[in-house]
Image (cartoon, rainbow, N blue to C red):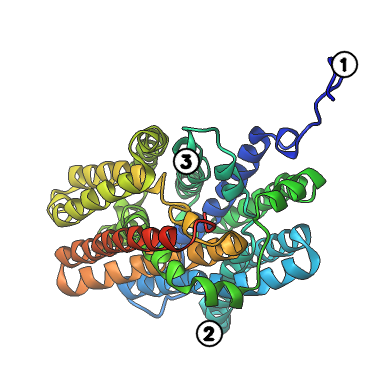
Amino acid sequence: MNTGNTVPAETPHQRVRLSDLTIGVIIGRTSEFFDFFTFAIAAVLVFPQFIFPFASPTNGVLYGFLVLALGFVARPVGTAIFTEIDLRFGHGFKLTSALFLLGLSTVAISFLPSYDQEGWLTVASLILFRMGQGAALGGAWDGMSSLLALHAPAGQKGRFATIPQIGAPIGLILASSLFIYLKTSLSEEEFLSFGWRYPFFVAFAINVVALFARLRLVVSDEFKTLFSESELDPCPVPVAIREEWLNIIIGAFTPLATLALFHMVTVFPLGWIYVHTPEDALAFLVIEIIGALFGLGAIIASGFIADQIGRRTLLTYCAIGIAIYAILSPLILALGRSGEALYVIIGFSLLGLSFGQSSGAVASGFLKKNRFTASNLTADLSWMFGAGFAPFVALYLTETLGLWSAGAYLLSGALCTLAALTLFRRRQEERRSQDGSWR
């Protein structure tokens, strides 16, 4: 019997505060997106001249975008490898080894010699290190975002879903600002010789900070208990694929419009402008910083909207909005500098509303015992199909057929999202009618 002098036992949820999880998630996601945007900006401003000087400016950017995409191709492979490490040695060892690989691959890029010095060895090294980054990001999945969502207060699921997503605009703002500073502070020769390397050093330093911030939580007994009680332990990848293959496919295509738009307003237009008016590239980075601020505000707003109308309802409306934007975007871009600014601001606003709720939107459809690994694989495939090749495809289509084709490409992503959301609802109703234990 409980007496007035008895102190209630403290639960793991109380000991691992949501504020601690929030900080860990934000630091982790910001470091990942800073890595990504550092490579993406370098793929436009540096690699065409430094790594691919034998190609035309257009082909140089296209080659850079292809290497960028290889990182997304490597992510599912990294997930498979590091999930096995997790099962054998635990979350802490997995996260440490994954982030060590990420940091090593990132800093190795900063030491690359030019193509004029080492030829195709430089190209092969860039490909290897980029794939190392991708595999490491697949392995760096720590489940804290899922844990945060599961323990969000009632009626605030949408708001807590935005927390991992705000790392994207922050990472873009930091990476763009650093490149702008270096490009304006150094001569072109100095920038191409050594200046471009500094953002990769900074990315490595941020990874070290992120490692300790996340590791402090992951290896704690309280976190392990909370993870286990939330049924977020990993399962073997073959098991997740065998039992959840349909939901994984549906989940991979659900955020397709969002992730395609992600690259269509960040990486693709930077490459397009660099190819046609390279002197305007820095000015466009400034526009993207402004757009990222709009995106950040929209991400935060998406949480409040989703808590009122539901996450998947919001994603449906956003997919329709992205489809309309895809049709109008070629006309907007054709307006010159003002059109570019309008394209970015409207695009980032739509992106923020959609991206804010795209993470784990279908995770509830997985069986509990498979949820951790299946969610990891779904995220990997979402980025690979939705974003990985988007800059390359959009730029290639634009240079071959015109701006309208890039809009058509984005429109196809919006249609895929609408189809996936419809299929998920039907799948969810089927499972609910068959078995009430899946939730």
Q: Amino acid at mark 2?
A: Trp
Percent position of residue 218, x then y: 74, 50
Give me the disc on residue 120: 2
Please name whichever residue, 149 or 302, is drawn nearer the observer in this view of the structure. 149
How far apart are the two marked residues, 2 and 3, measured between alpha carbons?
42 Å
Element class at badge 2: helix
Residue that appears at 55% across and 33% down:
153
Q: What residue lies at 34% left-to-right and 42% top-to-bottom?
A: 353
- Binning the other alpha carbons within 10 Å of mark 2 as few (below 14), some (14 to 19) or many (20 upward) gives some
Q: Which numbered disc flags the more N-terminal residue, 2 or 3?
A: 2
Q: Which residue is mark 1?
A: 5
* Label 3, label 1: how far apart the Cα atoms are: 41 Å
In-image side of 153 versus 426 (left or right): right
Residue situated in front as seen by the camera: 100 or 80: 80
Q: Of callouts 1 and 2, which one flags the residue occurring earlier in the amino acid sequence?
A: 1
Question: Circle 1 — which element?
Answer: loop
Callout 1 amino acid: Asn
Q: Which mark is residue 162?
A: 3
Res. 101 visible in picture: yes
What residue lies at 58% left-to-right and 75% top-to-bottom? 77
Above or below, 4 against 120 in this view is above
Using the rendered view, name the quadrant where residue 59 is placed: bottom left
Tell us which disc is closer to us: 3 or 1. Answer: 1
